[in-house]
Amino acid sequence: MKIEYLADCIEHVPVLAKWFHNEWGYLLPEIKFEDRKKRLYARANRESIPIAFVAVEGKEPVGSASIVECDMDTHSHLKPWLSSVYVASDYRNRGIGAALVTRVIEEARVAGFSNVYLWTPKKEKFYAKRGWVLIERTTYKKENASVMEYLLEE
């Protein structure tokens, strides 16, 4: 398994958009599938946020994660954010999600950030095991949300 910049494997955008639409479409039902693809194309960067990464096994995408400026409009003062961490169901529990999270953390560190944020409705324990700290529990998009922070070492 390799983790690539989406910019280097842009052909995977339709698959990623389908995953995201199926997984999180209920959070923003006004965003149509074609709009999700456009949002992903906008993350096909290497040197400026937003940046998406794709975990690839052979030639197949198996997961993805992004670093974005803000992923929670109620918390726009916090920047940047780990976003859209997804691993295809057949590939879960193999460390791919953890590897994607680590890649985003490293990218944020190289970019000079001192911390990274995320919000999750269900995976607080997954992130806590990897050093993320809960900073708030709230409701967002009608979901229970854990807002978490990862402090980057200098």
Image (tube, helix red, strand yellow):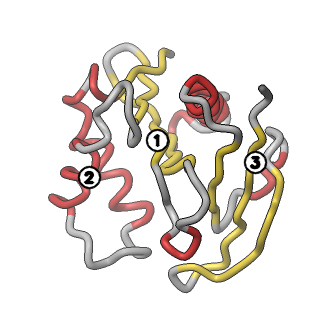
Instruction: Tell me whether the residue at label 3 lies in contact with that at label 1, contact meaning CB atoms closer than 8 angstroms.
Output: no
How many residues crowd mark 1 within 10 Å: few (<14), some (14–19), many (20+)? many
Residue 26's place in the image compared with 84, above or below, is: below
Q: Nearer the viewer, mark 2 or mark 3?
A: 2
Q: Position of residue 125 (x, y in %)?
A: 80, 54
Q: Nearer the viewer, mark 3 or mark 1?
A: 1
Residue hosting label 2: 39
- The amino acid type found where label 2 is placed reads Arg
- The amino acid type found where label 3 is placed reads Phe
Q: Residue at x 26, y 33 (%)?
A: 12
How many residues crowd mark 2 within 10 Å: few (<14), some (14–19), many (20+)? some
Q: Is residue 95 left or right of residue 90?
A: right
Q: Residue at x 43, y 65 (%)?
A: 24
The image's mark for residue 126 is: 3
Label 3 vs label 1: CA separation? Answer: 17 Å
Q: Residue at x 64, y 68 (%)?
A: 121
Local SS, label 2: helix
- The amino acid type found where label 1 is placed reads Ser
Residue 72's place in the image compared with 45, above or below, is: below
In the rendered image, the residue lying farthest to the left is 34
Label 1 vs label 2: CA separation? Answer: 11 Å
The mark that comes first in sequence, 2 or 3, is 2
Q: Position of residue 136 (x, y in %)?
A: 77, 70
Q: Position of residue 55 (x, y in %)?
A: 46, 26
Q: Position of residue 18 (x, y in %)?
A: 29, 52
The residue closer to the viewer here, 45 or 99, is 45
Residue hosting label 1: 66
Q: Is residue 39 left or right of residue 128?
A: left
Residue 138's place in the image compared with 53, above or below, is: below
